[in-house]
Amino acid sequence: MELKGILSQMADYTTDAIVITKAVAASRVEGPEIVYVNKSFTTLTGYTAQEAIGRTPKFLQGIKTDRKTLARMAQSIEDQKSVCVEVLNYNKEGHEYWVEINLNPIFCPHSNECVYFLATERDITERKNAESQLMKAISKAEAATIAKSEFLANMSHELRTPMNGILGLAEILQGIDLTDDVRECVDAIHSSGMNLLSIVNDILDLSKIEAKELEIEKYPFKIKDTLKNIKDITSLSAAQKNLNYDMNLNTNVPDWLMGDGKRIQQVIFNLVGNAIKFTEKGGVSVSLDWKEISGKNSLMIQVQDTGIGIPDEFHKHLFNKFSQADTSISRKFGGTGLGLAITKYLVEMMGGSIGFTSKVNHGTIFYITIPIDAAPKQDILQSEIKVSHENSLVGIDLQHIRALIVEDHPINQMLAIKWLKKLGIKHVDSALNGFESLTLLRNNTYNFILMDCQMPELDGYETTSLIRDMEKQMNTRTPIIAMTANAMLGEREKCLIAGMDDYLSKPLNFSEFQSCIAKWVGATATSNVTPEVAPMDSSVPVDLSRLNEFTEGDKETETMVIHLFLETAYESFDRLKCAQLSEESEEWSKAAHSFKGASGNLGAMALHAICTDAEHKGTAPREEKDIILSNLYAEFSKVESYLKGLN
């Protein structure tokens, strides 16, 4: 048998289709002429050898055959080079099929001239169909994920509105004299509402993460402020369980870091919240360090508790969404199992890592590493800039702007008045409580109202509600800007649901104050920017730059402000002592809140911090309040001596 016949039989035994064409194409468009096909070609295409030989491969192509792939094959033939491509062809009955073609030039051994091209074609239709189904499934799953995330985001936003209304009304009721039974019910409503709001916030964060809408920002922030915010919010929960609760910041951690301070705060807050929730006795501690790891500066965070611990078999599922170590945990402690999943997402989005060690009935230690650098000096200065200009609102005639300040504390009232006049607003009226403001509103028209939220007799929320009722009859609406020292999450939403239009937190910041007022009077905020003075010595109990906001260098005004602050401070101590002796927790918290606002606005920040802690300890036992009062007296003595020494 001739070698040609042997090779032909061998070609027929292979399951791949074999096509041999001439090396020279009849035309670049049509392709080269077929001179041989094997039996597998007939099986694949339905065309016999007689029907194929003498034709070009174009008869196998159709509408969906990719023209760019055909061009690659034509170029390879022209260049006499090998190529491997995937092509969609059509069989004799017009059905589509996919082939993987290995096209190779065949050279004459004597002249090294390319005489033929050998195409080995493997049927990959099943694989391509599987890939297509997989891609459709992936696309469908992605669409479902997006739809779910959008639904969760929309539902979260929709739920927040009525929830904030429920919380706001519950808190108004908490400020009213109630019987013990009714108060217990109102407290339960408020507590349940806060838990539900926390769940809604978690779902909203999760939906943003899954929709890839959550972004990590980068800006300078003070890590001490971050820890203080967490301590302010969580200390009451720890105190209610009589837990030891401390935070330790290593001295090598820079005061200012460059990263997403809000997300770092959320991460620590989630871990601390869990630690307190799952710890019945002992304590919770937070420690921060700053080290170089693998050539990168990193913030090291550790949260340790003496709680129930996590069984070994649940370790690998701990960071999964909607996962908890045991179903009995959700029944006893509550929660959705989202907190740790979100925490892990956030840490990894910041380029960090999270891990833990745990022992049942002995506690858990979570440790986090986040790459982060110290904030550059120029960025720190930019964050501490102080706006200073006599009239920094432009674009409108300020002579006709009238403002009303509703604030019961004279120090806070004086600061707001001075800042408004500094902005160029000369017509400013003030009221010490909600009732006075209603009287003024019946006889005057104002462009906006600055409303303190915590006031005796009629607080800011109730006053706003009454103002809105009055305005319905007159078909008017005056912008109301909340001013509150409450740093709780959701406070802005609480003010808005009560009918207010905007929100400023105490201690007031002039730059934010200026921008807020400009927005509501339709002006443009302009400023001459000068760097803030260097951070004050920690041994100095009062930030003189804050005091200067009141005095503007005038000694008589300084004497008046100091006298007014000390006078109201003595009154606050009397209120705190009476509330302690009579065990009136609400009155204690109100007195501490008022003292806190005045201290912060004056710049006595250490005193402000102790007042913040005191505000959250309204239900603490008398012995603990003795310690708080002692600390307040000690710090106030420093402030008092310092202020009196200025005169």
Image (cartoon, grey):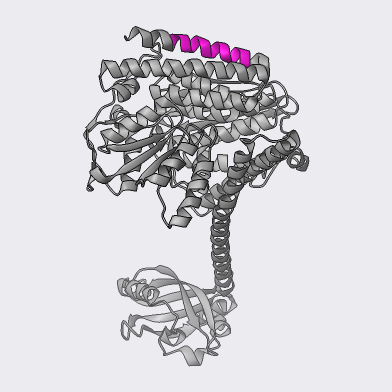
x 54%, y 30%: residue: 230
Is there any visible trace of residue 292 in the rendered image? no
Query: Residue 140 appears at what percent x and percent y?
Result: 57, 66
Query: Residue 468 appears at what percent x and percent y?
Result: 48, 50
Most common SS among magenta residues? helix
Toward the viewer: 356 or 363?
A: 363
x 75%, y 40%: residue: 326
Toward the viewer: 304 or 503?
A: 503
Residue farthest to the bottom, as pictured:
50
> Is 309 colored magenta in this rendering?
no
Q: Is residue 157 depicted above or below 420 in this figure?
A: below
Query: Residue 261 appears at what percent x and percent y?
Result: 45, 34
Q: Is residue 91 left or right of residue 116?
A: right
Q: Is residue 70 left or right of residue 358?
A: left
Q: Is residue 605 depicted above or below 267 in this figure?
A: above
Q: Is residue 623 depicted above or below 207 in this figure?
A: above
Q: Is residue 626 left or right of residue 491?
A: right
Write down the quadrant of residue 420 in the picture: top left
Total labels drawn? 0
x 67%, y 14%: residue: 623
Q: Is residue 577 depicted above or below 416 in this figure?
A: above
Quadrant placement of the N terminus: bottom right
Write down the quadrant of residue 193 in the picture: top right
Write down the quadrant of residue 411 in the picture: top left
Toward the viewer: 38 or 265?
A: 265
> Is 637 colored magenta in this rendering?
yes
The boundaries of the magenta stretch are 625-638
Residue farthest to the right, as pictured:
328
Query: Residue 508 appears at what percent x and percent y?
Result: 39, 31
Is there any visible trace of residue 445 in the rendered image? yes
Quadrant placement of the C terminus: top left
